[in-house]
Amino acid sequence: MAEFNCYVCSGKVRTGEKFTFTKKGSVHFDCFIGSRRKELPAEKHEQLRDLSLLLDSQLKYLLDVLAIKSGTGSDNEVISTAYKNSEKEAGETTRRIAEL
Ligand SMILES: [Zn+2]
């Protein structure tokens, strides 16, 4: 996996860590949610919480699929499709959080 730096903490995003991409670049899940919480008014925090729980589970799933994908199984098509779909869903949730 290519290495990225998180735009919030400037640290490296390592393989197996939850991260996502926004218009600003790559970001750790925790850094992303933490910085949004600081930026958003209190009345949006509940919405942020719900979306962050959703994104958290989507990113966990994505990492799980990625772990299978990097195995040696021969039927990779179904895994690739699952990966692309879950990546798309996580991207959509990220966009919603970025636009709160
Ligand atoms: Zn970070």
Image (cartoon, grey):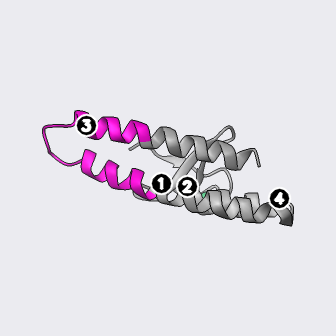
Whether residues under marks 1 and 2 lie with C-beta atoms below 8 angstroms apart, the answer is yes
Q: Which mark is first along the chain, 3 or 1?
A: 1
59 on left or right of 94: left
User: Considering only vertical position in the picture, is 2 above or below 15?
Assistant: above
Residue 65 colored magenta? Answer: yes
Q: Which mark is first along the chain, 4 or 1?
A: 4
How many residues crowd mark 3 within 10 Å: few (<14), some (14–19), many (20+)?
few
41 on left or right of 61: right
| Amino acid type, callout 3 | Val
How many residues crowd mark 2 within 10 Å: few (<14), some (14–19), many (20+)?
many
- Whether residue 4 is visible here, answered yes or no, is yes
Label 2 sits on residue: 55
Q: What's the residue at 57%, 63% (across, down)?
A: 53
Label 1 SS:
helix
Asked where in the image residue 2 lies, by quadrant, the reply is top left
Residue span colored magenta? 60-85
| Amino acid type, callout 4 | Leu
Q: Which mark is first along the chain, 4 or 3?
A: 4
Asked where in the image residue 99 lies, by quadrant, the reply is top right
CA distance separating discs 1 and 2: 6 Å
Q: Position of residue 13 (x, y in %)?
A: 51, 54
86 on left or right of 4: left
Label 2 SS:
helix
| Amino acid type, callout 1 | Leu
Label 1 sits on residue: 59
Label 3 sits on residue: 78
Label 4 sits on residue: 40
